[in-house]
Amino acid sequence: MKRHPFEPARLIAGLAALTVGAGYGLDALDLWQAPGLWLLLALPAGLALSGIAAAWTSARRHRTPPADPPPATPS
């Protein structure tokens, strides 16, 4: 199986979307009275953090020389 590089920006964006979805779900079930402004601003704030993380990761990857590939193991 091919390994994919870790992308922290996608993790942050997913957590932001999950947080907003959980907030709306809990509000719909009347388990939590979510302030509307908090839910409205949570997703753009998460996406902004995700953009910062993507820029930082991209800059760091372009500056770091690639690592040697791991030795092949017999299958």
Image (spheres, grey):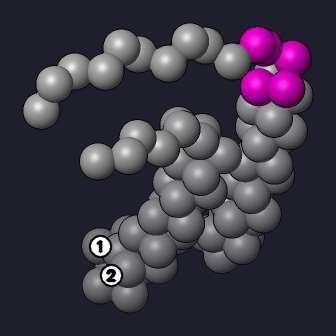
Front in this rendered view, residue 68 or 32:
68
What residue is at 81 percent from the left and 49 percent from the top? 51
Say which quarter of the image contains residue 45: bottom right
Label 2's element? loop
Most frequent secondary structure within the magenta stretch: helix
Label 1, on which residue? 31
| Count of numbered marks | 2
Could you tell whether 62 is left or right of 26 in the image? Answer: right
What residue is at 38 percent from the left and 80 percent from the top? 25
- What's drawn in magenta, residue-wise? 61-65
What residue is at 47 percent from the left and 74 percent from the top? 21
Label 2, on which residue? 30
Residue 54 locus on image (x, y percent): 77, 42
Front in this rendered view, residue 3 or 18:
3
Furthest-front residue in this view: 74
Residue 35 locus on image (x, y percent): 61, 69
- Name the image quarter holding the C terminus: top left
Q: Is residue 51 magenta?
A: no
Amino acid carrying label 1: it is Leu
Front in this rendered view, residue 56 or 49:
56
Furthest-left residue in this view: 75
User: How packed is label 1: few (under 14 Cα within 10 Å), some, or many (20 or more)?
Assistant: few
Q: CA distance from mark 1 to mark 2?
A: 4 Å
Up/down of 30 relative to 19, above or below? below
Amino acid carrying label 2: it is Asp
Is the Cβ of the residue at disc 1 closer than 8 Å to that at disc 2? yes
**Residue 43, numbered label:** none
Residue 24 locus on image (x, y percent): 47, 79
Label 1's element? loop
Residue 9 locus on image (x, y percent): 66, 46
User: How packed is label 2: few (under 14 Cα within 10 Å), some, or many (20 or more)?
Assistant: few
